[in-house]
Image (cartoon, rainbow, N blue to C red):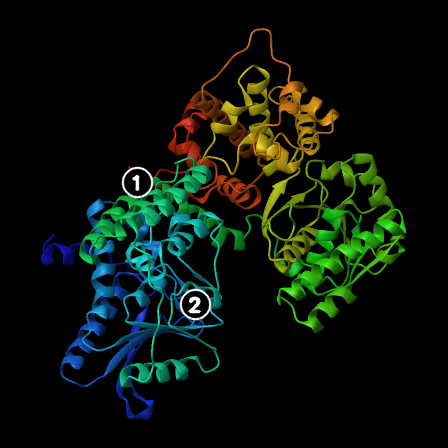
Amino acid sequence: MTTTTQDQTQQQLIQPDEVVTHAHVRDLQLPGGAGTFALITLDNGFDHTKPSSFGTQGLRELSEALDTLHARAEAGEIVGAGVTGKPFIFAVGADLTAVPSITTREQAYEIARLGHATFQKLSDLPVPTFGFINGASMGGGVELPLYADYRTISADVPAYATPECFLGLVPGWGGTYLLPRLIGVQDALTLIVANPLANNKMIGGKQAFKLGVADRLLESVTFLEDSLAFAAGVIAGTEQVDRREVDLDETAWDAAIEAARGQVEGRTGGAAPAPLRALELIKAARTADRATAFEAENDALADLIMSDELRAGLYAFDLVQKRAKRPAGAPDKSLARKITKVGVVGAGLMASQMALLFARRLQVPVVLTDLDQARVDKGVAYCTDEIDKLLAKSRVSSDKANHLKSLISGSVTKEAFADADFVIEAVFEEMSVKKQVFAEVEAVVGEECVLATNTSSLSITEMAAELKHPERVVGFHFFNPVAIMPLLEIIRGDATDDATLATAFATSKGLKKTSILVKNSPSFVVNRLLGRFMGESGAIVDEGTPIEVVERAFGGLTPMPPFMLISLVGPAIALHNSETLAGAFPDRFKASPNLAKVVEAKIASFYGADGTIDPAVLDLFEAPADPTVLTEQEVRDRALSALGDEVRRMLDEGVVAAAQDIDLAMITGAGFPFWNGGVTPLLDRTGISQEVTGERFLAPGVASVPA
């Protein structure tokens, strides 16, 4: 591509609404008379509300600043140069908001080339160069300092990561070449592939330093001052830098790549191209020269930017970052009532997890009740033990731990709820039991106390029907484990009023959960769709297809195979959900008789200790006289078609406001992969939406490359 063509392509990529990350340059006198040092500070001017990122205009400004520094260095005006970020933020990578407007591979390639060309100018400076990693660093924010000769990192950096494979990209501005050659192939694979596929795991500054990404770990209070002192020492020759020697042995390098490939295949089933492409680039990094490696990254980025998987990943990212913060249909937040005390009915594991979360997040008293003192004591002890674990890991201080423990108490009488503003039940999933609980609670609480239920499938309307104030009953459905799973399904019963609903949403926000508003309907969103998926999979096995074939059919499409999912939630719970749905929708839901046998035999998992299907389960399964055996592709098509049908029915029923809420729920509540965008982009992309329902769920170009 000629320079003129590159300039034209760059102009096409300029976004008028780009929040430009400026490259502010200032001269500083290094301590000890070491000379004049030029420091670039990356800053988009948005305080901390929008982290700095690299768009086309920002890259051009950085490029121009580095050109100026090159001339000054050659003229002897500066003895060194460095780059840092605004307070608490170094940079969080490329500005991906422009991706939907990229319509050609040529434009995608130019984005890749421009990043390399700009960052390369840092390493080309004829004076020692430094990266001062002062805050959150992701993607291109990790890569830019790799071009410097030396690096420091703050101990308080909260997030250091290369999340590209999580979204459908690779760290293609030098990451797949520079990282493995700096810290070794194994640690680089952890950062580039393993962590992104582990729900986009982040590490902190101290962990990053241990991996070897920086030469000095410094405290945040005097980070810049100490970084400049380090630079002065390097330039004066008084600071010695020792780095690990990277093992470039072919056998060891390739073995690490192949081990990672097996993990990727197991996690994605080969359905996500980005991590596999990253492995190819890291494999080649062992022997490739920089120019060859960077050109391979350019090609990889150009291909991946033009992939449906990236568009789906960005769609999913937008859901969890934006739609999750403004739940569709939520009432005016000014209607929400203040919560000063929480009651939890039940003291089992789920209830105890909720009690601990309420205490930690809302910082209000929480009281658990149960049928006897032993159960209550066990629930409170669980909370106490978990707080002690947080203390041991230094996640809370001693004072904080003592305060949290003081907030959580137990009682065998519901009179303890008399002054509570919010009471949630987590008792046995049986309508009569829940009705009795709410009647007892209503008798002792104030008229404005919210009564919430953690039911996973039962009718909120029916549960509230016999109360004096049914308007204050709301569904508040957590997912297990409570502290980890982000989703809360908030269900409005027929009588639920806006004040109750607003309080539920405000409470969810205080708990730092992702909320969606759901119409009162059997099993709500996640359990209804999982019920259809697992039910269809169970029917396929009941008809004669081996379990192993069904389990292999969904790699990369669902968070885990269906019978592994049943094992995770528990066969008894899965059976109860399927029976609830079969009662509501007998035309398409049916409880599996083989699953019922597993529950009756009290078998907790379809899998044995060796990770294979338990022979005891297979012995229970009754084969049909005339079996129908499907291929993996046929299994996949049938199950996805069932999902497509159920999604359409739910949208037509108004269970949620839009398909985006279905996807948000399945990503945050069931762990459906980002690279598929949840459920509906996958169904659209495979043509199943049109085949089953006659139309797409999303408009063309949403979560996919424009046609």
Instruction: State the residue at coordinates (66%, 63%).
Output: 390
Characterize the local packing of mark 2: few (<14), some (14-19) or many (20 or more) Cα atoms within 10 angstroms: some
Determine the residue positioned at 38% across, 41% down.
261
- Badge 1 crowding class, 10 Å Cα cut-off, few under 14, some 14 to 19, many 20 or more, is some
Q: In this view, does 632 lie to the left or right of 383?
A: left
**Residue 603 seen from this side:** yes
- Secondary structure found at label 1: loop
Q: Which residue is drawn at 48% across and 36% down?
A: 679
- Ranked by sequence position, the earlier of labels 1 and 2 is 2
Disc 1 to disc 2, C-alpha distance: 42 Å
Please name the residue that numbered disc 1 is placed on.
Answer: 706
348 relative to 137, above or below? above
User: What amino acid is labelled 1 in the image?
Assistant: Pro
**Left or right, residue 87 beside residue 385:** left
Q: In this view, does 224 lie above or below 371?
A: below
On the rendered structure, is 268 left or right of 359?
left
Q: Name the residue under label 2.
A: 209
Is disc 2 placed on a helix, strand or loop? helix
Q: Is residue 337 visible?
A: no
Residue toward you, 358 or 698: 358
Q: Name the spot of residue 34 as percent of width and height, x first.
A: 28, 89
Q: In this view, does 395 lie above or below 263?
A: below
Amino acid type of the residue tagged 2 in the rendering: Phe
Question: Looking at the image, do the residues carrying marks 1 and 2 touch, with CB atoms under 8 Å apart?
Answer: no
- Image check: 137 left or right of 527? left
Residue 315 % position (x, y): 42, 46
Image quarter of the C terminus = top left
Identify the residue at horizontal 19%, vertical 48% (top origin): 106
